[in-house]
Image: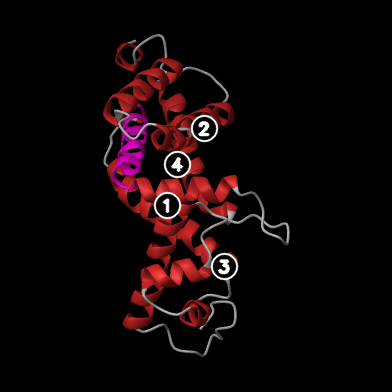
Amino acid sequence: MHSEIRSANQPKPSFIETARRAQIIDCAVEVIAELGFAQASLAQIAKRAGVSTGVILYYFAGKDDLIREVGVHVFTTGRSSIEPLVQQQLDARSALRTFIEASVAYIAANPKKVLAIMNILRAGRSDGGTLKIDPTVYQPRQIGFRNILEWGQRDGEFRTFSVAVMVETIVEALDAIPSQLAADPSLDLDAYAKELVELFDRATRADTPVQELRVR
C-alpha cells in the first residue's frame, strides 16, 4: 500500500483506505505536538489511532514516510485555507495583508499542526541525513509571497527592494509564531497579526500612494 511501491496499474486507494491514512496522519500530528518528535514512536501513534503498529506500516513505509506525509498534510491544508482568500484581492497591498492575516489565522486555528511541524524541524535530519519534511512543500508559500511583492512593484504600490530578502523576512516572522505560542498559549494572535500587517505594509509600500501615481 506504500506510495513508493504502488504500481501505475494498481487501483487508487478506496475511501476507507484514504480515511484510515488521514486518521493516522492526524494522530501523528497530535502525538508529535504533545510529546515531541523523539517520543512520537509508531507505537504511540498507533495507540492514539486505536490500531496496531502493523496497520501503520501497511499504509506507510515507516516513521520517516509518515513524517513526510504529515508535512505535506499541514502545508497543503494551510494553502487550501489561505490561497482562496488571497486570490480574491484586487491589489497587491490587500493581497499581502490578507496573506499575512490568513497565515496567522491558520496558526491560531490549528495550533497542534504548526507545533508538530516545529517539533519535527527542531529534530533535524533523519538517520539517513535527509530532511524530515520534503522542502518542496514550502515552495507554494514562498512563490505566493514573491508573486505578490513583484505584482506590487510592477503596479507602483510597493517601493523598490529585494523581493528575495523580503520574502524570507516575512516567512521567518510567520514561522516564529508557533514557538512563541507554545511558550505563551495566551498570546493574542489577532494583535500579533495586526502588528505584522502594519510592519510589512510600512516596509513595502511606496512613498507615493499608487492613486497619485495613476493621476499623474
The answer to which quarter of the image holds residue 102 is top left
Kind of residue indicated by mark 1: Glu
Residue occupied by mark 1: 34
Q: Which mark is residue 212?
A: none
Kind of residue indicated by mark 2: Glu
- CA separation, marks 1 and 2? 23 Å
Asked whether the beta carbons under mark 3 and mark 4 sit within 8 Å of each other, the answer is: no
- CA separation, marks 3 and 4? 30 Å
Residue occupied by mark 3: 63
Q: For numbered disc 2, what is the local secondary structure? A: helix
Of 13 and 212, which appears nearest the observer? 13
Q: Residue at x 47, y 55 (%)?
A: 32
Q: Residues within 10 Å of mark 4 (few under 14, many from 20)?
A: some
The answer to which quarter of the image holds residue 2 is bottom right
Instruction: Say which of marks 3 and 1 sits in front.
Output: 1
Q: Residue at x 27, y 29 (%)?
A: 190
Extreme right residue here?
128
Range of magenta residues: 93-110
The answer to which quarter of the image holds residue 122 is top right
Residue occupied by mark 2: 172
Of 145 and 72, which appears nearest the observer? 72
Q: Residues within 10 Å of mark 2 (few under 14, many from 20)?
A: few
Q: Which mark is residue 144?
A: 4
Marks 2 and 4, the one that precedes in the sequence: 4
Of 1 and 93, which appears nearest the observer? 1
- CA separation, marks 2 and 3? 27 Å
Instruction: Say which of marks 4 and 1 sits in front.
Output: 1
Q: Residue at x 71, y 60 (%)?
A: 127
